[in-house]
Image: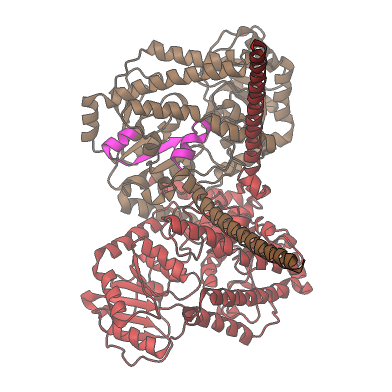
Chain colours: A brown, B red
Amino acid sequence: MELGLRLSLCVLLTLCAAGSARGGNILVWYTEGSHWINMKPMLETLVDRGHQVTVLTPEKSLYMNISETSRFHYESFDVSLSRKEMEDLLEESIRFFMYEMDQMNYLQIFLRFSEIMKIEMQYSLLYLDGVLKSETLMNKLKEGKYDLLLADPLFPGSDLVAEILDVPLVFSLRFSIAHNWERKCGQLPSPLSFVPVALSKLTDKMDFSERVLNFLFSQTTYCPLLFWTHCYALTSSPYACETMGRADIWLIRTYWDFDYPRPFIPNFKYIGGVHCRPAKPLPEEFVQSSGDAGIVVFTMGSLIHNITTERGNMIASALAQIPQKVVWRYKGEKPKTLGANTKIYDWIPQNDLLGHPKTRAFITHGGTNGIYEAIYHGVPMVGIPMFADQPDNLVHVKAKGAAVIMELNFMTTEDLRDAINTVITNKTYKESALRLSMIHHDRPMPPLDEAIFWIEYTMRNNGAKHLRVHAHELTWYQYYSLDVLAFLLSIVLLVTLLFIKTCSFCFQTCCNRKGKTKRKAE
Amino acid sequence: MELGLRLSLCVLLTLCAAGSARGGNILVWYTEGSHWINMKPMLETLVDRGHQVTVLTPEKSLYMNISETSRFHYESFDVSLSRKEMEDLLEESIRFFMYEMDQMNYLQIFLRFSEIMKIEMQYSLLYLDGVLKSETLMNKLKEGKYDLLLADPLFPGSDLVAEILDVPLVFSLRFSIAHNWERKCGQLPSPLSFVPVALSKLTDKMDFSERVLNFLFSQTTYCPLLFWTHCYALTSSPYACETMGRADIWLIRTYWDFDYPRPFIPNFKYIGGVHCRPAKPLPEEFVQSSGDAGIVVFTMGSLIHNITTERGNMIASALAQIPQKVVWRYKGEKPKTLGANTKIYDWIPQNDLLGHPKTRAFITHGGTNGIYEAIYHGVPMVGIPMFADQPDNLVHVKAKGAAVIMELNFMTTEDLRDAINTVITNKTYKESALRLSMIHHDRPMPPLDEAIFWIEYTMRNNGAKHLRVHAHELTWYQYYSLDVLAFLLSIVLLVTLLFIKTCSFCFQTCCNRKGKTKRKAE
């Protein structure tokens, strides 16, 4: 009790004294999709706390709906891309990851992946051009006198604009490919022996061959970074990593409930589950009618609307065979095999459902947001990963004992039915989910408050450069003390060499003398 | 406001729900000197929060006064050492560091230092024997059913006893020599290129020669670790580092106000300034009478009672020449040159004086506790370091712009007077001190609350093993992926060799054929 009171008093004093009396002026870089879902609760809270929030929004955004709330200011910019082109790329990516990849060899996968990444980068650059090359907008931003730029670096260019506007920069990031930005630009130490690179599907416990793989992954995935630098070169700054590295705070959207314990540095803050919140009561009778068996919540995320008819029927008939009632978020054609226990919805209140006491399991594609909601409420999972970070995310939850993983294209009705039954009836899954939930909740500060704290901290201190490690100023060989080792090694070698030479000289002189003595004696 | 309230509510809910309803049963390992000063505020707060605290105390403790408070239980143990022997070692160490060292060459220093360290280790072992070899005490401890052992690992053996009693272990540590325990046993990553080893007097900004020095320091100071392992071998467990590495939480008594930003891991928590508290009003008229000039606070710490008469006179006449009034804590003979502006006291309320608005500077020997009180209150410092971590501590504060360093045996009256005048009149020192103070106060949780949080966390979760990195299970060459590199390098070599052999074979075959054709043509 006393600790709580003292704590609130302290935070209060700090915040009131140091700047939250005057609301800050925050510029937010555009985001899309599930990244916007993560950003919004932070922005809402910032507005609640008296800050002015201005969001940069592409006019043809697929996800950011300017009209949806008037709580933020919006600053829109034009992108020379049609909505159709953007939708096409998204469709293309999904098709590649969901279906084509399974029929390709490694070379084909690599080439197709590189191609998609390249188009994505080109599109991102067009977005950036929309901001940077609009003189009107840039002038408006300069006149805006912002105290901070908040950005998800997955949507590139924020670091460059922060530099131009000369304002502190806070990143909110789930991960970059192979953790390249965190490692190379943010100087986050990541020993490859127990820190698996992002997307590798490895855990912190790796055998020798897995460590070799992890090492190779960390090297091969340099390509996106190369694209990246190349992109930046086009837009005037050749030092992508350097400008990214000037970010004051990196808010990383994981925590030790989901992630493996790993080294980090003072300006990296782990705010996984920042969007989670308690469940609201459900008006839904369907859930109440499920009796003791309870319900299963099933969604494939905001990007996937439908799957093939065959897969849909297979899934539906698996769901029909379990004793639970199933709430399925699905926009595709109604499967013929749909059981009486399964109800399909266009949209579901996912968080409220996961927080319902009758919920027994969560069938998920493995997006971080959904996984975090399940961790928050302590619900075991059946994962059907599809693309991007989803397979890797589910490996995390599986390694921590709270999930079973299925493969969409290869699982049978029986596989899925058994998997659902397993996570529900085998108590260890529920226990692991509850343990992760405990780790999630039992921390000094809830993730949303921690995110807000560090955003406001950066504003009131006009940056947080005193939390940055000096590693930013070192070359890679200096960082690993390779120059020091080389220097010391050469000294050792030199001394050894001198010693050997001296010995051999002494030995020779000695022999020669003996030889002479011998010859004389003869 | 809302954040504060929500925060306190959250901490309250977490704490109430998860175990602080039932008071825990905490065993505290013995400490001495300034380490006891750090430990006490934590123990007081734990008692305030309803926990039962039992402190292991050597019967002939030099600093722990069993009768001073009845708020803790004390469990005393006998040590086969006389108080005289302990006092002699202390005197000997102080004499060595304060006077003898300046007249010795490096080899003499190393030999004498090793000798003192060895005796200290032998004495520590006698303390440990006092606990481990007392069957009565060990049985009592086993029956005590403790929930946690809290220890400063500088006083060795707690990890072994935690293992025997099978209770979670929380360390509270300022530093170990060359950070050996943190690095080797705790798996704290410490790149030697920007993390200076403890006692090195280096900062995070090192040129090449300093990085070479830092590297060498990190290697030469293995000796104490060897002693340590040797000591443990005597007491049955040969795996000193392994048992230390099983500690659940390491509470490190620094923070980014005092320390250079560096990598750390999830079970390392930085609680520097854990003993600091707001100043109480002073009844002292002397301070009030100082007028606009203000006062200077001067203390050489709890270990040093007096200095030579000559040095005493020199210091006193420097103090007599400054416009401030001086509050000097000093138990030695009253110097003849003492000015009217200087008042000598046996004991001073140091924290209340440092927090007084009239205080302009702090003359300190550079102990961490005093430095942290000055940082807490934003007071610039003049450092006169003597031994142990004091020179290194003051380098930290100097590097951050809030201190000037003097050498006791070489400074003149003018040097000291000028140094005091500089930190008072040159505004940058006060500004730096205030900036450090701001960094100290502006964090999500005050250090004492954070320490308590993690102690209670470890109790309610019966350990915190899920925060430990997997690096503990790796050998050093696995940690640095040297086996992986060797493997990949040999493959590259093999392929290159095969390629060269094939080429040379083809070339030879080709040449031979040409030769034959030529010969035929001839």
Region of the chain picked out in magenta, as a range: A160-187
Q: Nearer the viewer, residue A521 or B118?
A: A521
Q: Residue B395's spot in the image, x, y percent?
A: 41, 65
Left or right, B391 with respect to A330, comes to left
Residue at 36% from the left image edge and 23% from the top image edge = A125
As drawn, B456 above or below B158: above
Left or right, A498 with respect to B365, comes to right
Q: Residue A113's spot in the image, x, y percent?
A: 52, 19
Residue A185 is a magenta residue:
yes
The quadrant where residue A387 appears: top right
Q: Residue B63's spot in the image, x, y percent?
A: 56, 79
Location of the C terminus of chain B by quadrant is top right
Residue at 45% from the left image edge and 77% from the top image edge = B301
Q: Residue A473's spot in the image, x, y percent?
A: 40, 47
The quadrant where residue B299 appears: bottom left
Q: Is residue A392 visible?
A: yes
Q: Is residue A382 visible?
A: no
As drawn, A100 above or below B190: above
Q: Nearer the viewer, residue B314 or B102?
A: B102
Residue at 38% from the left image edge and 56% from the top image edge = B439
